[in-house]
Amino acid sequence: MDKKKTVIIGATPNPTRYAFLAAERLTNHQHPVVPVGIKRGEVFGNEILDLREKPPVDGVDTITLYLNPTHQREWEEYILSLQPKRIIFNPGTENDRLAAKAADQGIETLNACTLVMLSASTF
């Protein structure tokens, strides 16, 4: 299986949140994860990088979003600057404007659920 370096935007150490579950399942499937968010902490051995600092990340295959569209606007240029191959807009994060900007840069976009994709082996 191809290992896909995945940036989780909206990462959190809260085990009741979907972003946390995504980090867990991605780790279980041996995909390298880079958690980025405004919550401090660690998920599965990876320190959550501070979104406000717009940390550089190289070699990004996938960005999986866990920020609602009103909060995405502030980070759109940062998200695109990571030059991912694709962006997954998880349920509740769908954003036609950001998806169009990404498509203009040749980035694949999916309105999908990372957890379902992992379960169905379509990640």
Image (cartoon, rainbow, N blue to C red):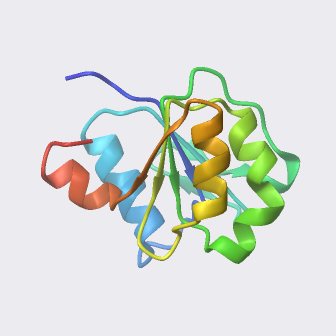
72 displayed left or right of 28: right
Which residue is at the far left? Answer: 120
Image quarter in which the N terminus is found: top left
Q: Residue at x 35, y 54 (%)?
A: 24
Is residue 66 visible in the rendered image? The answer is: yes
Q: Residue at x 78, y 56 (%)?
A: 75
68, 53: nearer the viewer: 68
Q: Residue at x 46, y 30 (%)?
A: 5
With respect to residue 78, does 23 lie above or below? below
Q: Residue at x 80, y 46 (%)?
A: 77
84, 66: nearer the viewer: 84
Is residue 10 visible in the rendered image? The answer is: no
117 displayed left or right of 80: left
With respect to residue 28, does 15 lie above or below? below
Q: Position of residue 50 (x, y in %)?
A: 77, 52
Count up the numbered dots: 0
1, 76: nearer the viewer: 76
Q: Position of residue 39 (x, y in %)?
A: 69, 66
Q: Position of residue 69 (x, y in %)?
A: 65, 72
Image quarter in which the C terminus is found: top left
